[in-house]
Amino acid sequence: MENQKPKGNAMEKLASFIVDKRNLFFLLYIFALIFCAVATGWVKVENDITTYLPDTTETRQGLTVMNDNFITYGSARVMVSNISYDTALDLQEVIEDIDGVDTVEFDATKNHYADASALYSVSFDAEEDDDRAKTAMQDIRDALADYDTYVDTQVGVDTSADLQAEMSVIIVIAAIIIVVVLTLTSRSYAEVPVLILTFGTAALLNMGTNFLCGTISFISNSVTVILQLALAIDYAIILCHRFSDEHETLDTREACIAALSKAIPEISSSSLTTISGLAALGFMHFGIGRDLAVVLIKAILFSMLAVFTLMPGLLVLFSRLIDKTRHKNLIPKITAVGKFDVKTRYIVPPIFAVIVIAAAVFANKCPYCYTFTDLVTAKQSESQIAYQKIKSEFGTSNMVAIIVPSGNYENEGKILAELENCPEVKSTMGLANIEAMDGYMLTDAVTPRQLAEMAGLDYEVAKTLYGAYAIDHDQYGEFVNGLGNYKVPIYDMFRFLEKEMHDGNVTLSGDVQDTLDDLFAQLDKAQVQLQAENYSRMVAYLSVPEESDETFAFLDKMHDIVSKYYPEDAYIVGNTTSAMDLSSSFGEDNLLISVLSALFVILVLLFTFKSAGLPVLLIFVIQGSIWINFSVPYLQDSPLYFLGYLIVNSIQMGANIDYAIVISSHYTDLKKVMHHKDAIVTALNESFPTIFTSGSILASAGVLISVLTTNPVIAAIGECLGRGTIVSILLVLFVLPQILVLGDVIIERTSFEMKGIAGATRNVSGTMHINGRVRGYINGVVDADIKGVLHGQFNAAISTGTKVDVTQPDMYLTEGSVAEAEAAETNDTTEGGGEQ
């Protein structure tokens, strides 16, 4: 039986090959899964979202310069509550004595001590991912274990590992929900393991091939698995139900071939809307969109591949068990919803139109944010709790770095001085305002005598050193004119002295040597952080939030200050500049995604339904759900992270439109054989299992992500996704049916298949001669060229030239039929007349 030659069209031949060669496919999948299980360890994950900023932005350019030229040592803000000031001073000494701690800032000002709480600004002598800094941070925690302590730091905090641990829990819970939902919507209990195996395979294939993308974002790495399951579960359900239907009359092999040959075009068509919506992300200026688009579209394609090539073999393998474990339909009919929709078809659409207009206005006023430091998630990590505690007691800590071309200490000093005079600035740091000793700043220019007094050097040694410096820097005029008034910046001279001592040209006494060695060590740390060969870095600590109108206005002022001294090649880098860059590109990305996702989906729907009107109606409903979804943050006055909008906007348009498509497809088919009112009720009953399955899984995934992750970006995406899916389900069940019934005339008149139909409608009953093309209700529905005599009721659109001659109205109808026909006609007239 299985070796018989496949017959039929190309799709049936392909299906036959897949089913008959299922063992070969099993073997190939085993090899692929082993490879992908290993390859998941090759995937590189980028946790810094600013990496995906366009190269033209100041933040991206400044970060590149900063990372290439400077080292940033780890830091921490440590708050100890319920202690006296004397105890706070003792704890400062304890922290300073910990190996790996460089400096601890603490004083009696309100910036460091308030309401019996002490705030220590700790700097380590290593980068935040260095083991030395991590050990020191752990020693601080241990030393303060007996106190009420809160630590805000990135040292020793592995956000990627924390996120993966959270997502593992979410996946387990989501898997349980998926199993429950599939059990409810399946026709046989044995279908559930088939579905789970299919999508488990697809998920692993996608994860294992992510290394081909080079580096993927932490967003793609964390949410793709759940979104893949939620977005593509329909594909397996379609094939599973097709197989059950065909298996009623065919044996296992033939049923599987027939089901697959019919499901491939259907699933491929269904996937196009999801893929097209995700493809819109790839056009974002912000590179995270392209990253997500590639990974998610790849996930959809692998899901389709698994359904087309692995699932048929699993169905054959489990077929006997499927037959034995069949159960009654566990999903109830929603006839009451359909009848409600029919009765409210003149009420709900106008109300919905008003709501959509209001939602569009509110969504346009949605309070977006572009940094996530201040976002509060439903689940808080220890670091987030500490940050909020410190923020409530001592306010925000907003640091920005100013990067300028090196070599002009005077200009650097002027910039720092101007910034320190601004009320928005708490403090600044740069070589130009770091004290060397005796009140001199590192960049102050001093004479040989001043240096000798400062460093404890012999004056003649100092003069000799200055002479060597002048010759080394080709400043012979200073050497000839005398070195008494020759001034050199302290920092440059100490760097030169260090070089001469290293070369053996200068030898000093023990005490002076020890003092200078300590100074040189401090200068080395300052240099790697604040000065490179081509650039200098300064730091400003602001008292304003990371993003607000006031903050952005002050950032413009900072640019004005810096540009006075450095018109070119100067950068300001920080969360504030990142927020400003993201906000400037958000408007374009927002419009681009909204337009492209809607356009791509409309094009798919045009070819799917061969109607210009129906896609518009469907898009109107789903776009309405998007506006309602994103009007909630405005009504709650709660900031929404902008990526949550951009990503969910495209997913909601590309995925949730499937719910509307399912209902519309059933309705379009059913109204050919029954009245449109009955057709919409039946369509809802037939569509509800599919909508319930996909919708409940996607909504559950979104809600789980929003409440179980501490990552603000992921939580924002989950919250918007869950809420948007729920809104979409409610609208397609309680609003779309009314719109389809009322818009039936529009759908019919804009159908590509109604060539020659003028749209004129006749509503008569009795005996009539018909000659021409008609479409409508004739004791059922007829869409054909008719020539002959009809005895019954006629309610249809006719093409130009079609003749309908009523010869004996109602003569051949029984009294009951006449009464029924008249009642139906009267009912149509009172409810608007002429509905199709």
Image (cartoon, grey):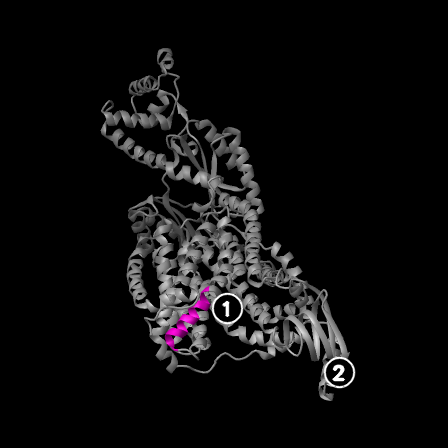
Under mark 2, the amino acid is Asp
Q: Hey, which quadrant is residue 503 in on the image?
A: top left
Q: Report the magenta stretch's main SS.
A: helix
Q: Quadrant of the N terminus?
A: bottom left
Give neighbour class at mark 1: few <14, some 14-19, many 20+ (Cα, 10 Å): many
Q: Position of residue 382 (x, y in %)?
A: 40, 59
Name the residue located 45 percent from the left edge and 41 percent from the top edge: 60
Quarter of the image for the C terminus: give it: bottom right
Q: Residue at x 31, y 66 (%)?
A: 26
Q: What residue did someone put label 1 on?
A: 695
Quarter holding residue 804: bottom right
Q: Nearer the viewer, residue 299 or 538?
A: 299
Q: Residue at x 57, y 48 (%)?
A: 587
* Bounds of the magenta segment: 251-264
User: Helix, strand or loop at disc 1?
Assistant: helix
Counting the numbered discs, the total is 2
Q: CA distance from mark 1 to mark 2?
A: 49 Å
Out of 312 and 49, give the one closest to the viewer: 312
The kind of residue tagged 1 is Gly
The location of residue 436, given as percent across then percent down, is 37, 32
Judge whether residue 154 can be spotted in this image: no
Asked if the stretch drawn in magenta spans residue 135, the answer is: no
